[in-house]
Amino acid sequence: MSQRKTKPQHDAPVSSPSVWMADKVMQVPVTDLKPYAQNNRVHTARNIGKLKASVAQFGFVTPILVDAQMGIIAGHGRLEAAKALGMQNVPIVVADHLSPAEVRALRIADNKLAELSDWNEAALQIEFAELMDLGLSGNLGFDLDITGFELPEIDIIIEGAAGPEDAPSETVTDPDLAIPAVTRPGDLWILGDHRILCGDALEPDNHARILDGETPQMVFTDPPYNVPVQGHVRAGNGGAHREFAMASGEMTPSEFRSFLANVLAQLFDTLPMGGIADICMDWRHVEDLITVGKSCGFDLINLCVWNKTNGGMGSLYRSKHELVCIFKKPGAGHVNNVELGKHGRNRTNVWDYAGVNSFGKGRAADLVDHPTVKPTALVADAIMDVTRRGDVVLDVFGGSGATLLAAEQTGRRARLVELDPLYVDVAIRRWQEKTGQEAVHAASGESFTTRAATSNQPLEEEAGHV
């Protein structure tokens, strides 16, 4: 009676040579290695650049795998990176125990097997968040794209890929006009990685003071529209909005254009070539803004529309949108984290976010916020479109702090100027509530909470009110 042959199991090979490959590591000249003519992986210049950066930072920690004839099995990209770095010798492992067929199969398997696993997204988020914290504190020493992930991908990993509809409701306490402001004109507050100055955006010294030698990569700012708040902005709970400290309808058209020109000229000088300035405006004055922006040297590269949930006040039509001019300082390319959705950021120039005059659940408190306050999620997305983590974002009409909160959320560093002391207080309180941290007065070292507890500043000392 014949013996039945047992079919080998895939997880238990018939022969498994005991080969400890670490014993076979050696250094050889790069000229000795023979790239495989039918290599089934394509390495772009961008890919080689990342491999080059990895080898330069971490060393050549993964030897190139070759067969007995020095033909490369795995490591074509690493060889190109080594050549680009000017390396004369590289570490290799010689797999001379493999048959020609096994070499061919291993070339494929080495690339394919790594693709079969999935990322532990929660663990990856923690790793990147902690690495980013090290980077922001100056203790990292390298860029995170050295990991192979693009920076926009890292933003999404850390922040999540939530859409505008997922943004939480924001609760804001309107300034109480009967209580003196904690902040005084000229005060500079330090809020973790951020700063806010109570001062006039028209004054060049205030721009210099808030930046303190730094260069912002981006401006996001929401200047007053020279429209009286009363009669144009609907308030919640029967309340009346506080008028802006300037350009609240008191300027003539030529005065308003001069006002915009003063500010935009300073922003143009402040930004680097390729820097982006997102400037908000309503339909009445967007033509003025575009004309002034171009006269200051900016290129208008797009016009975005904030499409709110509900319409505001109006005569013939209720206005349901605001406009955001996207200006660029020419001379260099700008940061583009969108790239037509390549990295998961699918963005258009129509921005759908709930407005502050939405009557949805949990939105009532928004109605008594700064009359043209922008949702934090809107500003955060705009910031992530054109900046990298750690970049400085400047807002010279800081209002109630949307840019401050957006920068905190996205790992950028906000620099705000706001004329109205009461709105500086609002911005600081919002940030403290969000972070659990304490704002500190730059000159005295006094905390905001301590100042608030002892403040007895008379109302007539407040500047910038109408």
Image: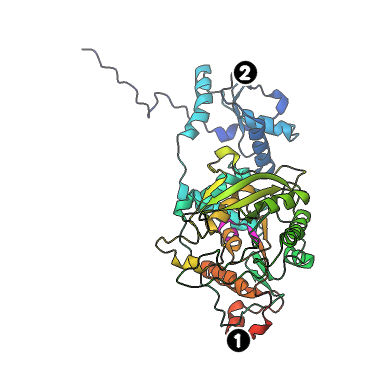
Q: Tag 1, which secondary structure?
A: helix
Front-most of 161 and 202?
202
How far apart marks 1 and 2 lie (CA) works out to: 78 Å
In reply to whether residue 403 is colored magenta, the answer given is no
Towards the viewer: 39 or 397? 397
Residue in view at x 75 percent, y 65 percent: 202
In the displayed structure image, the side of residue 187 where residue 348 appears, left or right: left
Task: Specify whether 10 is left or right of 349.
Answer: left
Q: Is residue 389 visible?
A: yes
Q: Say which element carries label 2.
A: loop
Name above or below for residue 62 compared with residue 39. Answer: below
In this rendering, does residue 342 appear at all?
no
Image height of 361 relative to 7, above or below: below
Q: Nearer the viewer, residue 456 or 131?
A: 456
Q: Is 413 included in the stretch rendered in magenta?
A: yes
Residue at 60% x, 21% y is 68
**Mark 1 Cα within 10 Å, few/some/many (few <14, many 20+)?**
few
Which mark sits nearer the N-terminus, 1 or 2? 2
| Residue to which mark 2 is pinned | 37
Residue 390 placement (x, y as % from top left): 65, 55
Dividing the image into 4 quarters, which one contains the N terminus? top left
Q: Determine the residue located farthest toward the top in the rendered image.
A: 1
Which residue appears at 47% of the width and 54% of the height?
A: 309
Three-letter residue code for mark 2? Ala
> Which quadrant is the C terminus positioned in?
bottom right
* Neighbourhood count class around disc 2 (C-alpha, 10 Å): few under 14, some 14–19, many 20 upward: few
Residue 214 image point, x, y percent? 74, 59
> Which residue in the structure is indicated by mark 1?
454
Residues in magenta?
A: 407-414
351 with respect to 420 (left or right) = left
The percent position of residue 194, horizontal first and vertical second, equals 64, 65
Tell me if label 1 and label 2 are in contact, CB under 8 Å.
Answer: no
